[in-house]
Image (spheres, rainbow, N blue to C red):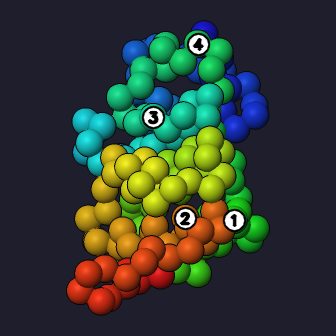
Amino acid sequence: MTTIHVNGAAQPFAGDPATPLLYVLRNELGLNGAKFGCGMGQCGACTVLVEGRPVFSCLLPVQALGERKVRTLESLGSADKPGPLQKAFIAHQAAQCGYCIAGMIMRAQALLEQHPRPTEQQLREHMQLNLCRCGTHMRILAAIRQVAGLPAPAATEAGTTEAS
């Protein structure tokens, strides 16, 4: 029997320790925020925080966790009481299909915990590993900027600005 620490609670797990964390979260613990996207750590839909760092839960076997603490989207808020990032993503209509959003929010949460006021370059580089197939990246960045209290980026050479 293995114990994993998720969202502040110790959870027993009696299954195969090589099981990817994503499957344990969704199938055993009923935490459906993290999504199965590609299963190869290339899209970020399954992103959760392990000791405050974003990881692709589809690639992380439970046995590799040890005593490290896991946080999922469910730790940030609920439909009735969304957290600051969740509120900003709603306000900026950052979700089109919504499939990537939990992973995006968790990656952004990690960034803001490490750098509460990141530079534009830090923001873009950090978020680059998570993909949005619907193309709402500009709205996602705007939502994160809002929470961080950052201004919208300056106008581009063409004289237009990003959606914010």
Dot 4 or dot 2, earlier in sequence: 4
The nearer-to-camera label among 2 and 1 is 2
- For marks 4 and 1, give the one nearer the viewer: 1
Contact check, label 4 and label 2, Cβ < 8 Å: no
Kind of residue indicated by mark 4:
Gly
| Tag 2 secondary structure | helix
- Sooner in the amino-acid sequence: mark 3 or mark 1: 3
Q: Which residue is drawn at the image coordinates 75% and 31% (left, top)?
A: 9
Mark 3, secondary structure of its residue: strand
Residue designated by label 1: 84
Give whichever of discs 3 and 2 has the lower sequence position: 3
Circle 3 residue = 55
The residue at 50%/48% (across/down) is: 107
Q: Find disc 2 in the rendering and name its residue.
A: 144
Determine contact: label 2, label 1, CB under 8 Å: no
Can you name the residue that lies furthest to the bottom here? 159
Q: Quadrant of the N terminus?
A: top right
Q: Quadrant of residue 83?
A: bottom right
Counting from the top left corner in percent of width and height, residue 46 is at 42, 44
Q: Nearer the viewer, residue 18 or 148?
A: 148
Residue appearing at x 75%, y 34% in the figure = 8
Q: Classify 10 Å Cα crowding around label 2: few (below 14), some (14-19), many (20 and above).
A: many
The three-letter amino acid code for the residue at tag 1 is: Pro
**Does 108 sit above or below residue 38?**
below
Q: Earlier in the sequence, mark 4 or mark 1?
A: 4
Q: Quadrant of residue 14?
A: top right
Q: CA distance from mark 4 to mark 1?
A: 30 Å
Label 4 CA crowd tier, 10 Å (few <14, some 14–19, many 20+): few
Rounded to the nearest angstrom, the CA distance separating label 3 from label 1 is 21 Å
